[in-house]
Amino acid sequence: MARTILVVEDEPTLRETLVEALEGEGYRAIGAGDGRDALVRFRADRPDMILLDLMLPELSGIEVCRIIRAESGVPIVMLTARSSEVDKVVGLELGADDYVTKPFSIRELSARIRAIFRRGEQVSAAPPALVDLGPVQVDLAGHRVLRDGEAVPLKPKAFELLAFLVRNAGQVFTRDQLLERVWGYNYAGETRTVDVHVHWLRAAIEPDPARPQLIHTVRGVGYVFRRPG
Ligand code: CA
């Protein structure tokens, strides 16, 4: 499906030119002529990107950017006639992803657009760093578990075990496999070590540790992590 780009620009000639050029590149392009219309179109059409002129009637581009950013992470490219650093800084601080200074070439603009879409694909293709388990979130990159934004105290091995199980959700492991994979091939411990760590993990992350909903015991086999819901 073609990606939708909302072009917010009050100068009709430029708006039409941009809409046509973007459609020529295979996008679905929608025009809006002022700040209020921009918000209406944004909410109705859910565009994949917004090209946003800074100087607009009704609501300024800065205002529009602020409002949209509060509602969505959609990429926003500011179109600014002024090349002052202040505008760029303000725009970027408000969450614009990029800006182009007028006059710009269609070629330059579409290169920026492609780069932003590419960046978005890479981000969404990467494994999520924060796994939401309902009551707690597992911050795989930060090696911690969060409850209400606060880190839950966990021993490093307990976290490693949790991270391993979360990364392999749905897969059942024996205690020996977990010892091998989490503690290492040369670990001389007993399988009871796994049980103890699972016990700690359940106390830390399960709403009711006596009735686990995340780390399940598979009788006669071992353990499996299942995502909630
Ligand atoms: Ca303008």
Image (cartoon, rainbow, N blue to C red):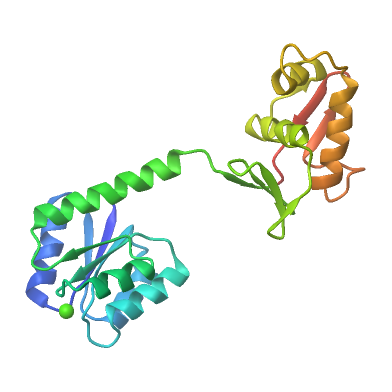
Q: Is residue 89 left or right of residue 136?
A: left
Residue situated furthest right in the rendering = 210
Residue 76 appears in the rendering: yes
The image shows residue 144, relative to residue 197, as above or below, that is below
Q: Which quadrant of the structure image shows residue 210? A: top right
The image shows residue 124, relative to residue 56, as above or below, that is above
Q: Quadrant of ligand 1?
A: bottom left
The image shows residue 151, relative to residue 99, as above or below, that is above
Q: Residue at x 68, y 30 (%)?
A: 164
Residue 2 appears in the rendering: no
Q: Residue at x 31, y 82 (%)?
A: 36
Q: Residue at x 46, y 69 (%)?
A: 71
The picture places residue 19, in percent across and down from the top left corner, at 15, 63
Q: Is residue 2 left or right of residue 218?
A: left
The picture places residue 149, in percent across and down from the top left corner, at 68, 59
Q: Which quadrant of the structure image shows residue 91? A: bottom left
The image shows residue 151, relative to residue 37, as above or below, that is above
Q: Residue at x 41, y 76 (%)?
A: 67
Q: Is residue 209 left or right of residue 109?
A: right
